[in-house]
Image (spheres, rainbow, N blue to C red):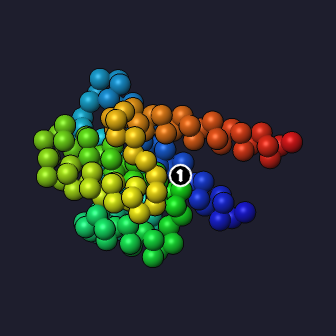
Amino acid sequence: MFEHDYLMRMIMQLIEAIQRSINMSKSGADDPAAQAQLLEDAIGSATDMDGGVLLSLSPDSIANILDLSGTDPRVVEYIGRSLYLESAYLAQAGATDLAMVRAEQALALAEHYGFPLDEELGPEAAMEAFLSDRSSERSEELDAASE
C-alpha cells in the first residue's frame, strides 16, 4: 500500500509539471526555456536522483541507470514522454543540441522499456493523448476498486 501511494505521488508530481508546461503554451505565456526547466526539475524529483546527473548521462546509460535503480516502469514512461516534450521546448528555445540529446534519451527509454512516444502526433499532442488515456485508466481502476 505504501509503495503504491509513493508511486502515485511521484506520477502525480510529474503530471502536475507536465500540465503546467502545456498550460503555459496554451495561455500565451509561452516561455519554452522555463517549460523545459519545469519538466527537468520534475524528472529529478520523480527519480529520487540528482536530476542534473541523471540527465547528463548518455541515452543508453540513462535507461540502464533507471533500470538498475529499480525505478518503476510506469514512472519511466512518464519520464521518457516528459523528455520528449522537453526536447520540443528546448528546440523552440534555440537549444538545439540539448534538444537532440533529450530526444535521444526519450527514444532510448521508449526502446528499452517498450512504450511508444507517438511521434507522429508531435510532443505536446502526444503527451495530452497519453495523459487522457491514463486518466481514463485510473478512473476505471478506481471504479473497479470501489465495487
Q: Residue at x 65, y 42 (%)?
A: 138
Q: Residue furthest bottom?
A: 68
In the image, taking residue 37 as reference, residue 114 lies left or right, namely right
Pick the front one: 13 or 117: 117
Name the quadrant containing residue 125.
top left
Residue 110 pos. (x, y %)? 40, 55
Pick the front one: 1 or 135: 135
**How many C-alpha atoms fall within 10 Å of the one at disc 1: few (<14), some, or many (≥20)?**
many
Q: Is residue 34 visible?
A: no
Q: Residue at x 39, y 73 (%)?
A: 65
In the image, taking residue 145 as reference, residue 90 lies left or right, namely left
Q: How many marks are shown on the rendered structure?
A: 1
Name the quadrant containing residue 58.
bottom left
Residue 35 pos. (x, y %)? 30, 41
Q: Residue at x 30, y 58 (%)?
A: 105
Location of the C terminus by quadrant is top right
79 over 122 or under it: above or below: below
Task: Report the amino acid beneath label 1.
Answer: Ile
Q: Secondary structure at mark 1?
A: helix
Location of the N terminus by quadrant is bottom right
Residue 59 pos. (x, y %)? 28, 64
Residue 114 pos. (x, y %)? 46, 57
Q: Is residue 84 visible?
A: yes
Q: Residue furthest right?
A: 147
Q: Which residue is mark 1?
A: 11
Q: Residue at x 34, y 40 (%)?
A: 119
